[in-house]
Image: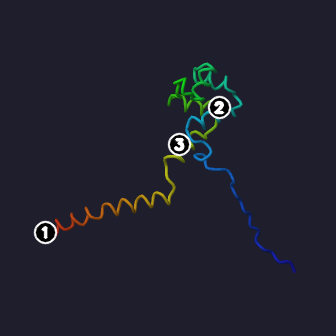
Amino acid sequence: MTSSSPSIQLSIDFQPLLTEQYKTLVEVCAAAVYASRAGLSGVAAHCDLSPSQLTRMLNPDADDPRNLPAWAVPKIVEATGDQRPILWLVAKFVPDEKTRQRLAVTKLVGLLPEIQNALAVLREEK
């Protein structure tokens, strides 16, 4: 007689969150460009930029005020196929379910006095 026990597979993700791994959107875009098979030249061409212009935009320097323009981010995603810039934005600005619930409770607590005042006014009008 053999006993069959269900097998359980444990999956652990040791990779840090994108927002911890990359502090800025420019950093994650640079990682996408430099890891791309298209290479810096291919991505720059897709963005209608020279490789040196794109390099200067991806490596901000206090002495060189070139910033990565917002229009370049979707072009970088298209050229590289790397969705990390999009996922970074989502991780940065779309809170998880627990955070959304906590924010909702905080809003309700803030609104509670206004709701009570409005109910009191309605009671007085009857």
Q: In this view, does 77 lie above or below 90?
A: above
Judge by depth and name the residue closer to the eye, 33 or 66: 66
Q: Is residue 116 above or below residue 2?
A: above
* Circle 3 residues within 10 Å: few <14, some 14–19, many ≥20: some
Q: In this view, does 48 lie to the left or right of 7?
A: left
Residue, disc 2: 33
Q: List the single residue furthest toward the bottom.
A: 1
Residue, disc 1: 124
Q: Residue at x 87, y 80 (%)?
A: 1
Label 1: element kind: helix
Q: Which amino acid does label 3 sit on?
A: Leu
Q: Residue at x 55, y 39 (%)?
A: 24
* Circle 2 residues within 10 Å: few <14, some 14–19, many ≥20: many
User: In 3D space, how far apart are the residues under numbered discs 2 and 3 (Cα atoms)?
Assistant: 17 Å
Q: In this view, does 67 lie to the left or right of 121?
A: right
Q: Where is residue 82 in the image (x, y as percent from the top left)?
A: 64, 37
User: In 3D space, how far apart are the residues under numbered discs 1 and 3 (Cα atoms)?
Assistant: 49 Å
